[in-house]
Image (cartoon, coloured by chain):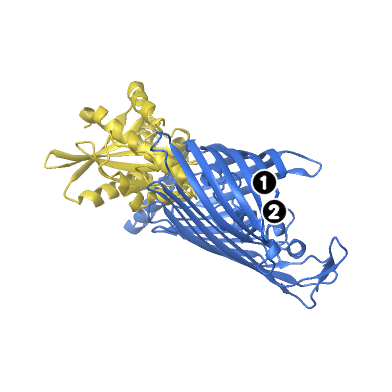
Amino acid sequence: MSTIFKIVLLSIFSLAIAQDEFFQPGSSIGGYGEMHWNKANDADGNITKNEMDFHRFIIYYGYNWTDKWSFKSEVELEHNFVADGEGELELEQAFVNYHAGNWGFQGGVVLPTAGLLNEYHEPPLFLSVERPTYSKYIIPTTWFGNGIAFYGNYSGFNFRLAIMEDLEGENIFYKGNIRDGRGKGYKTTGINLLKNLSASYTGINGLRIGGSLTLNNAPLADDNEEASSDSTIAVQLYEINAKYDANNFYAVFEYGKSGFNYDGANLPGYLNDDDETVIWSDFSSSGYYFDLGYNIGGFINTNKLIPWVRISNVSKNDDDVSKQTDYLRFGLTWWPIYDVAFKTDFANVTTDGTTTTEFNFGIGYKF
Amino acid sequence: MALQQLNLILGLVISSKFSQVIFPLESAQQVFVGLIRFKLISNISANLKPFILILISAILFGGSPIKDASEVFITSQFGDSVSIKMNTLHLNAELKSQVQNTVRQTFYRDELYYWTISQNDSTLAHAFLDNVLGKSMPITFLVLLNTEGEIISSEVIKYREAYGGEVGNKNWLSQFIQFSDTSDYSVGKNIDGISGATISVNSLSRGIRKIALLYPLVKDDLK
């Protein structure tokens, strides 16, 4: 037998036998949840809301076949039950993952990387009782859908490309935001495919900075008679984000902007609730929030206790002042252990010169 | 004839793989002993012996990229002039509970691999290989301690999940340098967190602390 043949054979056997003695195939479970008590008053001090809600209950289930091939899923129950159009039951994640050290692939129901909270949305990971309003209307958190994603990291830099189902142009047309255009993996289309490209850097202790660009020509459904058959709404969302959590300082900044542009032969319109014809016009939405807090847990001998302030603006339509809201929110968040957070916050919410108030209390956990 | 021989070889490779999957602790040597015990080797023709020798070498020398990576890291820290020798440390129940109760994290297994790093017959340092659980998979890490029990360096040898791999960053791991069994390992106070890697950060910080606490308890028993 030639030496080369022996060496080749040795290499093949070595690779075949080389294995991971610490890995054991098996399943894993986890989850998170949050209970909220939301109160609100109008400008005259009248109570407009006093609601207790077990907002989210999520079970995470995963199975690891090998050290490289695994399956991950998240099933979410919102508002504690589902009946008569109330509450939501959603499969928020369900993908096969191939992970090879510093790069990998995911396919199934995946998340685009957009904003800090979309992929990391467990309640102990953000300060406020409710997720920031920015993370609802500018980044439609939790944003998920059918698709695939490739990711990689190198020397503190992380990159990810997700290619996903189309947004529903019809719903963006009527409702004017990405949030209502999410297909959520339910019989969605793959005509133009959504592309989400992101990068982040985590090479400095306690700091994470990142940004993303998301593009999709969202098809309008055929049943919109006034829209030409191949018409779309071109959606472009870009955002930047930064989070610093070290030396007892806690600071977060996010900014994002979306453009919505109709692309088709004739400009469609529709009748609104007042029977007025509304003609589509291109628009943009944008927003930001800035959190600043300081951990005083060391002074009173507890794990982590942060008083904080948030300044935020969310503009659902940059041309319409009635859809632009300022938030000034103060809060106190206590983590007796890392995975449990008790939260309370108070906010002044100002839209077009009118200020209302909010008071929230919440308990969140993850495991 | 040649085809049958190849089939036999493939069969052996597959069966040895399975035996290690089912009994992960079974070492390559035991597979070797097993082969002799069942007289597989003595019954095969001389023609097949090179295949078998290659197979056995592959099992003995090609089996553990994790140990190889650990030794590469140790060599990168101390250079080629030192001698390094791997041993296994068995953890008894008393030892385990002593450490686990303080850190509030269980040991991944009842034994640890460790390397003794020495030069001219004097011990310079020890390196411990251990695992903690991330979100759903083990994180394999190595901690190097000097003979005073102070951490010289640490390294993530293998990270198996899509999220949280930032705990492998050199900057983050360098925070543990000079820590010992008496240091404060609190994440957020003494150890900076990593946004997006919370589970891994908390888990690995505890894992590194476990090794630092274990060291003075086992120091005199190390080879």
Residue A357 visible (yes or no): yes
- Of all chains in the rendering, the one displayed in blue is A
Residue A144 image position (x, y, % from top left): 64, 53
Residue furthest out toward the front: A44
Judge whether B193 appears above or below A179 on screen.
above
Q: CA distance from mark 2 to mark 1?
A: 8 Å
What amino acid type is highlighted by mark number 2? Gly
Please report the residue visible at 56 percent of the width from the left and 46 percent of the height from the top.
A128
Q: Give the residue type at disc 1.
A: Leu
Tag shown at residue B1: none
* Chain name for mark 1: A
Q: Residue furthest left?
A: B120
In the rendered image of the structure, the colour used to display chain B is yellow
In the rendered image, which residue does mark 1 sit on? A91
| Left or right: residue B110 compared with residue B120 | right
Q: Judging from the image, what secondary structure is the residue with disc 1 in?
A: strand
Element marked by disc 2: loop
Extreme-top residue of the structure: B94
> Do dots 2 and 1 share one subunit?
yes
Kindly identify which residue carries mark 2: A185
Q: How many marks?
A: 2
